[in-house]
Image (tube, rainbow, N blue to C red):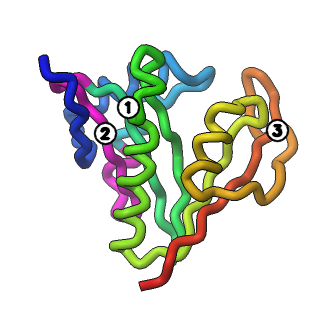
Amino acid sequence: MNNEVVLRRMTAGDIPGAVEIEQKCFSMPWSEKAFADSLALDYSVFFVASIDEKIVGYVGLYIAYDEGDITNVAVLPEYRRKGIATSLLEKIVIDAKEKNLVAINLEVRKSNKSAIALYEKNGFVDLGHRKNFYEKPTEDAVIMKRQLESR
């Protein structure tokens, strides 16, 4: 065991690990089918973080024209506060720039202060709120955006 974090594109074989993360992190987790369907889209990209071949985090991005929308950034609770989410965000930003995207958008629960702080630290700004965007429990979303430098 070397505890080195490896970032790479998500494959179909990574879906069970991503589903495990979803179940531990979210009240309405994605299913294996949802991941498989998303991976099959030509306008999506997903990356995983693994340690000793165990999937410990992932990030997903849907691309629409010249912007990207982050689906989720998730890290297993026992692996948080180790820079993994930051590394995943950096990886998706690099990929977005390579695809000539001009911005990345996301929504986050208003109560998720640690995630909001992470996004702000990584260049995302608060654009406003979506009332009752989330369920289980019902909660507003903070809409955030990061502008990317044009090439």
Q: Is residue 116 above or below residue 54?
A: below
For label 1, the residue is 57
CA gap between label 2 and label 1 equals 6 Å
Secondary structure found at label 3: strand
The amino acid sitting under disc 3 is Asp
For label 3, the residue is 140
Residue 108 in the magenta stretch? The answer is: no
Frontmost of labels 3 and 1 is 1
Residue at horizontal 35%, vertical 53%? Answer: 91
The amino acid sitting under disc 2 is Val
CA gap between label 3 and label 1 equals 24 Å
For label 2, the residue is 48
Q: Sequence order check: which comes first, mark 3 or mark 2?
A: 2
* Pick the front one: 149 or 99: 149
* Image quadrant occupied by the C terminus: bottom left
Residue 130 image position (x, y, % from top left): 82, 48
Q: Sequence order check: which comes first, mark 2 or mark 1?
A: 2
What is the quadrant of residue 92 in the picture?
bottom left
| Label 2 Cα neighbours within 10 Å, binned few <14 / some 14-19 / many ≥20 | many
Query: Residue 83's mark?
Result: none
| Label 1 Cα neighbours within 10 Å, binned few <14 / some 14-19 / many ≥20 | many
Residue 19 image position (x, y, % from top left): 39, 25
Q: Sequence order check: which comes first, mark 3 or mark 1?
A: 1
Residue 52 in the magenta stretch? The answer is: yes
